[in-house]
Amino acid sequence: MNKTEDLRIDFDPDSAVAKLVDEEEVAAMRRKGLRKGDFGDRLLLGKMGGESGWADGFILELSEPPENIPHEAPDKTDMDFDNLVSGEFAPKEYPELICLGATEATDDRNSLAVLASHDKSVVVLMNKRYFGHFSKRYENARFYAGNSSNSPITVAHKGKRVGLIMPYNIENFGRVHIEKRFPELFEE
């Protein structure tokens, strides 16, 4: 892969957030996977839409668990993950999110990935390693906002849902950290 391909970010160049994207930082985030310490405290196995998947409380992926997952055995099996989302995934029904970069780390939290809709109407935060995991695993992965700021973020590949990520609550994390890094994000 050459440097130009490595820095390629898929977004509408005329969107309201296009000039906010830190392409080099996002490309670096896309190369990172999950470390053992990034997983939640339990492993759950089940099905969503008839497909097998795994979850750890923060992330759900429709695949086999990664080899580096720190859990020796699942806490629960045969889970029904269908209750986490309603119906089939329809990309046109949800705002697509573009990763802009990451917040600065704080005393009590690592830096987080900041994603926004093309028109800046939706802003979400997620563990930047989760963004990296799906971006690295699924070439051209797309991220879509849920029905509310606390709804799971859908990760899609080739128009099909491949995972869910629980976002951080912006008010609990502190909007000031996002505004410090991306002040234009909240300008009218």
Image (tube, rainbow, N blue to C red):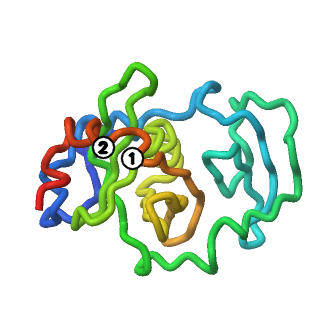
Identify which residue is drawn at 52% across, 34% down: 33
Identify which residue is drawn at 45% across, 48% down: 169
Q: 10 Å neighbourhood of mark 2: few (<14), some, or many (≥20)?
A: few
Q: 10 Å neighbourhood of mark 1: few (<14), some, or many (≥20)?
A: few
What residue is disc 2 on?
Answer: 175
Residue 98 shows up from this direction: yes
Q: Nearer the viewer, residue 6 or 133?
A: 133
Label 2: which secondary element: helix
Q: Quadrant of the N terminus?
A: top left
Marking on residue 62: none
Q: Quadrant of the C terminus?
A: bottom left
What residue is disc 1 on?
Answer: 171
**Mark 2 residue type:** Arg
**Mark 1 residue type:** Glu
Task: Report the side of 152 relative to 7 (left or right).
Answer: right
Tell me if label 1 and label 2 are in contact, CB under 8 Å.
yes
The picture quadrant where one finds residue 72 is top right
Residue 2 shows up from this direction: no
Residue 143, given in percent of the width and then of the height, sits at 43, 59
Residue 129, given in percent of the width and then of the height, sits at 48, 36
Distance between the Cα atoms at labels 1 and 2? Answer: 6 Å
